[in-house]
Amino acid sequence: MFEREVVHRFRAAGIQAERGYHQARSGAEAPDVVVPGLWVECGCGASVQPEKKLAQAVRDERVLFEKAHGMGGKVYPVAVTRRLGSRELVATMMGSHLFEMMSAVLHGGWTNLLFVAPVVSMQLDSFLVLIAKPWLDWRNKP
């Protein structure tokens, strides 16, 4: 299953992750991959559209606001997708959310946000490298 591969990639980066098993009942009870602080929806197929999977993650996170925030605070919607026949996994999220996550690394650095693309896509491994430190800092905060 594609979700299992995504879980393994997150774990290899030191980020706690597990399959979301509750989505089968209503389609929106849990993300495809449960990562504290992220709402991860996955898609793999010939015509997978990362922006649509991201829209689903945004919609589901908003609908289940209380439950999502019970996972440990602010939750950032993310889509992880792969086109059929490709080995490349792509992470897609709102540019402003990515900037907000990265500001934890900047520690008072450049914060005057002039422009952030509405949607940012990158290889999953690059995304995990970017978020691993801020995610671990956030999880280990007293």
Image: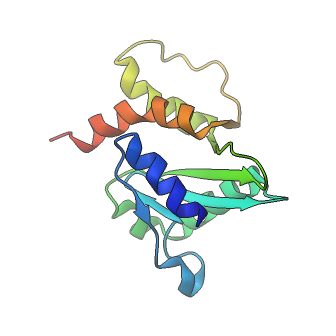
* Of the pair 71 and 131, the residue shown nearer to us: 131
Residue 45 in which image quadrant: bottom right
Q: Is residue 115 above or below residue 62?
A: above
- Which residue sits furthest top? 109
Residue 49 relative to residue 141: left or right? right
- Which residue sits furthest right? 47
Q: Position of residue 139 (x, y in %)?
A: 27, 44
Residue 132 relative to residue 46: left or right? left
Residue drawn where x is 60% and y is 62% of the image:
2
The N terminus lies in quadrant: bottom right
Name the image colouring: rainbow
Residue drawn where x is 62% and y is 59% of the image:
42
Residue 98 relative to residue 117: left or right? left
- Which residue sits furthest left? 142
Q: Is residue 60 above or below residue 55?
A: below
Q: Is residue 40 above or below residue 134?
A: below
Residue 114 in which image quadrant: top right
* Of the pair 45 and 23, the residue shown nearer to us: 45
Q: Position of residue 3 (x, y in %)?
A: 55, 62
Residue drawn where x is 34% and y is 52% of the image:
16
Residue drawn where x is 38% and y is 48% of the image:
11
Q: Position of residue 28 (x, y in %)?
A: 57, 75
Residue 23 relative to residue 133: left or right? right
* Of the pair 109 and 134, the residue shown nearer to us: 134
The C terminus lies in quadrant: top left
Q: Position of residue 129 (x, y in %)?
A: 47, 31
Number of numbered discs overlaid on the protein picture: 0
